Amino acid sequence: QVQLVESGGGLVQAGGSLRLSCVASRSITIVVIAWYRQAPGKQRESVASIIGGSTTYADSVKGRFTISRDNAKNTVYLQMNSLKPDDTGVYYCKIREWGSGVDYWGQGTQVTVSS
């Protein structure tokens, strides 16, 4: 089992920045890293992912968000710049373990962007 602990959410004004972190409880060989968000009344959606060596972003966040990882710290990040009120939601990290194919999810961190 792997526990993922997220942090870095909060309240920010439009145009501001936040960096979300997601720390795994142990070292894990990862095949997929992804950040999702769920806005009030909406379905959870993927905003950024790394699959193999390929990075993908939702159109709504391209050029503003950056997903990255630090293997030495068992941590993945989501740098969010030029935030907009539409970016408001609960953000979740997901990691898929190589071999088992099991997906692990963080508990979510709230991001609120005020206009």
Image (tube, helix red, strand yellow):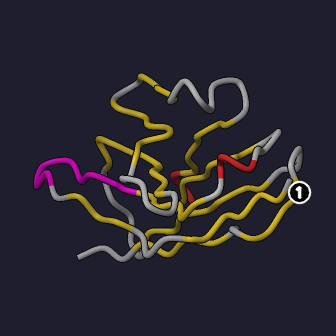
Closer to us: 27 or 86:
86
Which image quarter: residue 59? top right
For mark 1, give the secondary structure: strand
Closer to us: 61 or 43:
43
| Relative horizontal placement of residue 14, taking residue 70 as reference (left or right) | right
User: Vertically, is 79 above or below 39?
Assistant: above
User: Vertically, is 19 above or below 110?
Assistant: above
Residue located 47% across and 49% down the image: 35
Quadrant of image for the N terminus: bottom left
| Relative horizontal placement of residue 65, taking residue 16 as reference (left or right) | left
Residue located 50% across and 29% down the image: 58
Residue 24 magenta-highlighted: no
Residue under pointer 1: 13
Which image quarter: residue 50? top left
* Relative image position of residue 24 (x, y in whole percent): 44, 69
Residue 95 magenta-highlighted: yes
Boundaries of the magenta span = 94-101
Residue located 84% across and 62% down the image: 12
Which image quarter: residue 100? bottom left
- The amino acid type of the residue labelled 1 equals Gln
| Relative horizontal placement of residue 2, taking residue 56 as reference (left or right) | left
Q: Among all residues in the image, which is located at the extreme front?
A: 41
* Relative image position of residue 11 (x, y in whole percent): 79, 69
| Relative horizontal placement of residue 71, taking residue 79 as reference (left or right) | left
Q: Among all residues in the image, which is located at the extreme left?
A: 100
Badge 1: residue crowd in 10 Å (few <14, some 14–19, many ≥20): some
